[in-house]
Image (cartoon, grey):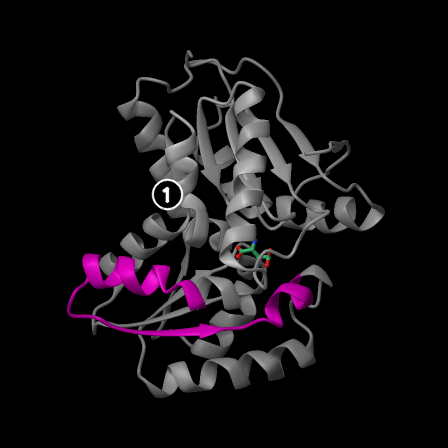
Amino acid sequence: MNNTHPIGVFDSGVGGFTVVRAIRNALPLETLRYLGDTARVPYGTKSPDVVRRYAINCSRFLVDLGAKILVIACNTASAYAVDAVREHFALPVVGVIEPGARLAAATTQNGRIGVIGTEGTIRSASYQRALSRLAPKAAVHALACPLFVPLAEEGMVDHPATRMIAEEYLEPLLAQGIDTLVLGCTHYPLLAPLLGEIVGDNVTIIDSAIAVADAVRAALHGAGLAATARSDQDLYYATDVSERVLRVGSVFLGDGLDKVELIDL
Ligand code: DGL
């Protein structure tokens, strides 16, 4: 393994492109290999054992491509499978929960933190556990917002219906007086402007993608694996490549997505 090898990133679908975007901005010399398990998305409603099995499949594919580090760019897979992936593969593994929780713990002033995510992520209590370690005095209010994933995928990021749903979802968290809101799902950063309008200036929104990019940088430096020059172009893979995957994927990536290679796990 040497520093010219790529960073392997996977998600249940195209939401992980929000993490790819943050890593590309923070670490422009690194080469990325991204796998979206678009044939099996969503993970957020699936049982823990199934999500773990899928996460191992995705990791195996990226390890076989020569990944020097694995980034689980999916909150649900991070919640259920980060330990299993670490046990299976002898390379650094970065999930999205720990970096996001760390940033939230450092941000809150009043110790009231809201976390929103898929049903799986919230049910796993992974953010709640991480925050009770990182900010033991904080009160954590966690809430599943299952409609946000399809709304983001439909591009309804500033639609009145999305606003109504978001107001309904967030009302109980705001009633608890939170000053920090963790976007515990890779799809939610697309909704951040709308959510920001609803929660107002007194609540800081935590987009864990940026915290993840910092964690990847630290892990690469710690392992002596940081690239010193760009060695290759980024490549994208998916288990289903439809017009929708390309269209929605380019919205999440914030850039043209001209080629995604279809693979079978
Ligand atoms: N990528 C998932 C997450 O961050 C959201 C989509 C899904 O349910 O698979 O939890």
Q: Residue furthest front?
A: 49
140 is within the stretch colored magenta: yes
Q: From the viewer's perspective, is 3 left or right of 46?
A: left
Q: From the viewer's perspective, is 262 left or right of 207?
A: right
Task: Write down the quadrant of residue 166 in the picture.
Answer: bottom right
In the depicted structure, whether residue 162 falls above or below residue 75: below
Type of amino acid under label 1: Asp
Q: Residue at x 31, y 65 (%)?
A: 128
Which residue is tagged 1? Answer: 83
Q: Residue at x 28, y 57 (%)?
A: 130
Q: Position of residue 183 (x, y in %)?
A: 45, 62
The residue closer to the viewer here, 260 or 81, is 81
Q: Position of residue 167 (x, y in %)?
A: 53, 83
Magenta segment: 123-152
> Ligand 1 is found in which quarter of the picture?
bottom right
The residue closer to the viewer here, 166 or 219, is 219
Q: Position of residue 120 (x, y in %)?
A: 50, 63
In the depicted structure, whether residue 69 falls above or below residue 166: above
Q: Residue at x 46, y 37 (%)?
A: 71
Quarter of the image that includes the N terminus: top left
Q: Secondary structure at mark 1?
A: helix
The residue closer to the viewer here, 129 or 7, is 129
